[in-house]
Amino acid sequence: MSDTLDFTEKRTVLIVDDTAENLTLMHSLLTDHYRTRIANNGERALKAAATEPIPDLVLLDIMMPGMDGYEVCRRLKADPVTRLIPVIFLTAKTEVEDEQAGFDVGAVDYITKPISPPIVMARVKTQLELKAAADFLRDKNTYLESEVQRRTREVQVIQDVTIMAMGSLAETRDNETGKHIRRTQNYVRALARQLQPDPKFAPELSDAYIELLYKSAPLHDIGKVGIPDAILLKPGKLTPEEFEIMKTHTTLGRDAILAAEELIDAPSSFLRVAREIAHYHQEKWDGSGYPDRLVGEAIPLSARLMAVADVYDALVSRRVYKQPIPHDQAVEIMREGRGKHFDPLLLDAFLVIEREFQAIAERFVDTNAELVAKARQVG
């Protein structure tokens, strides 16, 4: 777009009057400087005003048979196509009340008849310059708004890619494949949407919050980067001492995200949700989880959602050291955890959409090649 106003192009002026002599007079006065369009009644004026190119100014007689100038002006201002066209009334009415009535319906100026050509030319020029300036600023603002939106989208894409990269970094250190984070974030979103209409959850589960859940879910195991390989990659059962170390991945993840939060000036909803999930996704409804043995609704909703997603995925996913559990069997295992491992209401919602979970698992299934590559990577 141009950064300067262009006054060289001829502007279009619509002249509206029911008297042929007045139309001829105004056309003759303006035609050397502007493109003119004429209409001799209100209906034709409205059609002419809405015809491309849209006029830059309307000179409008008030006293016309049928639809008078006031009504024409009202309709012009009510139509999104023509509402920004400035209107100057041309009339023999000279009372203050008449002028006020014109301004009330949206006119920008008022010229009395018989006209003075210098006054008409000066006021037309002024209103056209004001219109050009307003159009320029409006176009500039539209451009700036679109540019802000474009750059915001770019930043959002970079953020999303960074999140996925950080989540994948944690996955590279254990026996999970990168598709684990894709599956779990989709499980979480599906479960949150199922709960959204419930009055108990609706205040928290706004569309924006569900989007935060979806984007922050990949960071749930970010703390695994701090667990020694001898424990993280151990094929057999962990000793009690090793398990205590493994459990610290929740607090390591919390601390890493907290450190990121401290680097920014304002609170971040995204980082807060990511920190909750990383810290508390191993908590259990009955208080037997870790790291803080929280009970029931003391566990943040974000972490309770992730607990359902994480356990289901662990059950149905193939690994180099285990076969997947069939979906229906996994559902029964999940059902047994109702009120123990899982929030009963969340588990009930899961049971309603368990086939959607199955479809997500099948969509992002780990291939043999990916599992072999993963085994070589961690081996």
Image (tube, rainbow, N blue to C red):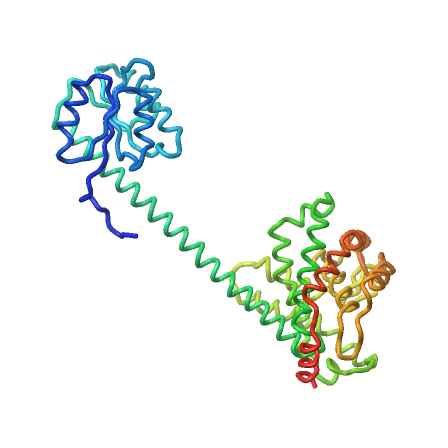
Vertical order, 159 against 301 (above or below)? below
175 or 353, nearer to the observer: 353
Residue 169 x %, y %: 62, 75
Left or right of 116 on screen, residue 219: right
Number of numbered tags placed on the structure image: 0
Where residue 326 appears, x then y in whole percent?
A: 82, 66
Q: Residue at (48%, 58%) from the top-left corner?
A: 153
Residue 199 higher or lower than 274, as above or below: above
| 326 left or right of 248 in image | right
Looking at the picture, tell me which residue is in the foreground, 361 or 116. 361
> What residue lies at 69% left-to-right and 46% top-to-bottom?
202
Residue 346: percent from the left, percent from the top? 77, 54
Q: Residue at x 53, y 67 (%)?
A: 263
Q: Looking at the rendering, which quadrant does residue 25 occupy?
A: top left
The quadrant holding residue 190 is bottom right
Q: Quadrant of the C terminus?
A: bottom right
Q: Residue at x 36, y 24 (%)?
A: 74
Which of the 4 image quadrants contains residue 334?
bottom right
Up the image or down, 282 lies above or below 233; here it is above
**Along the line of sight, the residue nearer the viewer: 77 or 281:** 77
Q: Is residue 2 left or right of residue 188?
A: left
Viewer-nearest residue: 351 or 115 = 351
